């Protein structure tokens, strides 16, 4: 959006009312798709932070509740439909924890996600993050030095996740196999096993 379009959207009372109705209705209906659509619009328009935070909290609550129901059925999440958005929410929460240097909290979420999804590419990428978090690498340092920003991910499924690195993922995981084994051993209690 151009700055003129943003200004028009921010000052259009009908659009702002529509967004507010969408926010309230999506929370009430626990509609993860509409919640994210509304959140993304509110973020782009830089609208009221307290309402954005309330919506983000509802996204997390809905995601955690629904993921728990799915996992309790002993089913892994495929990256499609609402499940993709649930995984996105948990992932973003993990990255947020990492950005605040809560390495252990981020590690726990990343570990759980890696074990409840059915997607090899994302699982490997999550394991890279798990190793990186175990080394207490700052998010910005990791992003600047290890994430390949030159590659445009063709599969939009992965657009929410860091999956492209400046190194070979398989080689990295092999080189860090012992660290990964130790982390899995330390964190396996989170899976209820």
Image (spheres, grey):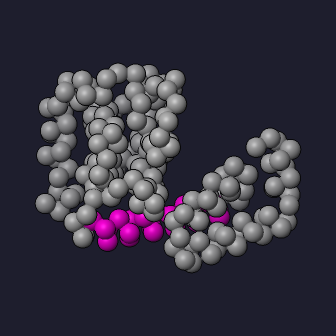
Give the number of callouts. Answer: 0
Q: Which residues are magenta?
A: 50-71
Residue 189's place in the image compared with 122, above or below, is: below
The one of 83 and 98 positioned closer to us in this rendering? 83
- Residue 95 location, x and y as percent? 44, 44
- Residue 91 location, x and y as percent? 41, 50
Residue 62's place in the image compared with 46, above or below, is: below
Residue 36's place in the image compared with 26, above or below, is: above
Tell me what residue is drawn at x 25 percent, y 52 percent.
Answer: 115
Report the predominant secondary structure element of the magenta stretch.
helix
- Residue 188 location, x and y as percent? 17, 52
The one of 161 and 140 positioned closer to us in this rendering? 161
Any part of residue 27 in sight: yes
3 inside magenta stretch: no
Q: Say left or right for 105 vs 50.
A: left
The one of 150 and 106 positioned closer to us in this rendering? 150
| Position of the N terminus by quadrant | top right
Residue 68: name its quadrant. bottom left
Tell me what residue is drawn at x 64 percent, y 74 percent.
Answer: 24
Tell me what residue is drawn at x 20 percent, y 24 percent.
Answer: 175
| Position of the C terminus by quadrant | bottom left
- Residue 177 location, x and y as percent? 17, 31
Q: Say left or right for 95 vs 31.
A: left
Q: Say left or right for 32 vs 167.
A: right
55 inside magenta stretch: yes
Tell me what residue is drawn at x 35 percent, y 65 percent.
Answer: 67
Any part of residue 130 in sight: no
Which residue is the extreme one toward the front? 154
């Amino acid at each position: 959006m151009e700055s003129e379009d943003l200004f028009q959207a921010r000052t259009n009372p009908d659009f702002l009312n529509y967004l507010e109705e969408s926010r309230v209705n999506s929370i009430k209906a626990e509609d993860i798709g509409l919640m994210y659509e509304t959140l993304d619009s509110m973020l782009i328009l830089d609208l009221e932070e307290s309402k954005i935070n309330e919506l983000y909290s509802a996204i997390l609550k809905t995601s955690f509740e629904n993921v728990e129901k799915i996992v309790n059925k002993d089913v892994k999440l495929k990256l499609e439909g609402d499940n993709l958005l649930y995984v996105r929410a948990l992932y973003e929460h993990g990255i947020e924890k990492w950005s605040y240097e809560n390495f252990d909290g981020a590690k726990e979420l990343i570990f759980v996600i890696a074990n409840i999804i059915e997607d090899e590419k994302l699982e490997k990428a999550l394991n890279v993050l798990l190793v990186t978090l175990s080394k207490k690498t700052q998010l910005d340092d990791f992003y600047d030095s290890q994430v390949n920003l030159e590659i445009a991910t063709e599969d939009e499924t992965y657009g929410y996740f860091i999956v492209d690195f400046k190194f070979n993922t398989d080689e990295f995981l092999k080189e860090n196999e012992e660290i990964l084994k130790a982390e899995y051993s330390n964190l396996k209690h989170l899976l209820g096993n």
